[in-house]
Image (cartoon, rainbow, N blue to C red):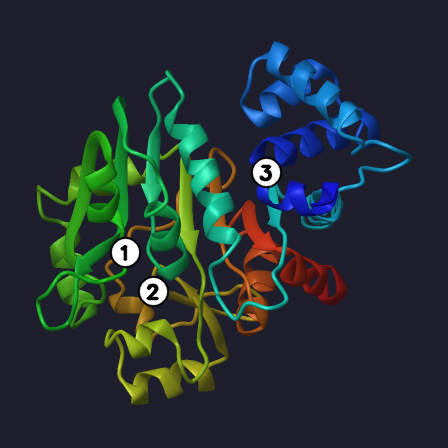
Amino acid sequence: MNIRQEAATNPRLDDAARAGWLYYVAGNTQDQIATTLGVSRQTAQRLVSLAVSEGLIKVRVDHPIANCLELAAKLRSRFALDLVEVAPSDPTSSSTTIGVAEAAAAEIEKRLKSEQPIVMAIGTGRTLKAAIEQLPPMICPQHRIVSLTGNIAPDGSAAFYNVIFTMADRIKARFFPMPLPVIASSAEERAMLHSQPMIQPTLELAARADVTFVGIGDLGPKAPLYEDGFITEAELKALQKAGGVAEIMGWVFDRDGRLIEGVTNDRVASAPLPSRERSLVIALAMGENKLPGILAAVTRRLVNGLITDERTAAALLAAG
């Protein structure tokens, strides 16, 4: 097995490659590297040394992760994002979550390991659910985890891709679910539900989130909102006709990142996205069908953080 093959399966070398790139290419200090990677200064120093001893450092970082780091730096600069993680793409895989789910799980775990109490808001979606399923068991009584979306499907069952309960099984923290339908039957019903005493504190907590993780759903023929039964085929076509290209937590927006007026948006029971000026809102998304939505979300600053893969990152830079 050569160094590249070993690196692809060795998380320690991944960390060493990141540290080496940050030190030798990006010019970060060891203190800055420690903060970025969420490790001690001594560990950061050892990782840089490991990158040298394993032959990862030459004129460039000789590791597949180097291209990911460079793409992340370009995305961060191009779209003024506060956080970007780019996972390597697997050209042989048709998965819509692989790589991104693992990177998101690592980011969520890092946040939960903080001794400082935080409020973490969670959206919904297949990629986010795949990320949560990879979290190790953790005991985090200092944190509060709040759902931004309703968890009731149209037939009254629990929404399958609402991840708050999956997360509650793994993380011992205070959880605040949103006991609402994903999309209400009318704007009046939504207003009535949001005014309930048991819902108001959850909405207020969501607005104060320190970090938020959401998925981006496309609005093509196999749109998650439609396939999961939250909207009808007629509503999907109406949203497409109105210019909708994607949705975050049910909120449908167009290529310019503007929310579509009417149709279903006036019935979405989700909480509004937390402030991107005061907090970090991170989208997890990859793939060609999601590209228009991702581009709109980062351009319009619906989100200020992104976890994606190499192919999607390169396409974003080419399109933007």
Quadrant placement of the N terminus = top right
Residue drawn 29% across the image and 51% down it: 271
- Could you say which disc has been placed on residue 250 in the image? 2
Q: Secondary structure at mark 3?
A: loop
Q: Residues within 10 Å of mark 1 (few under 14, many from 20)?
A: many
Side of 38 relative to 176 (left or right): right
Which residue is at 37% across, 28% downward?
112
The answer for how far apart the CA atoms under marks 1 and 2 are is 7 Å
**Residue 80 visible in this rendered orientation of the protein:** no
Q: Are marks 1 and 2 in contact (CB under 8 Å)?
A: yes
Which numbered disc, 3 or 2, marks the residue closer to the eye?
A: 3
State which quadrant residue 53 falls in.
Answer: top right
Q: Residue 7 in the image: state x and y as whole percent.
A: 66, 41
Give the mark toward the camera: 1 or 3: 3
Q: Position of residue 142 (x, y in %)?
A: 27, 20
Q: Which mark is residue 10?
A: 3
Indicate the amino acid at tag 2.
Gly
In front of the other: 241 or 125: 125
Above or below 157: residue 228: below
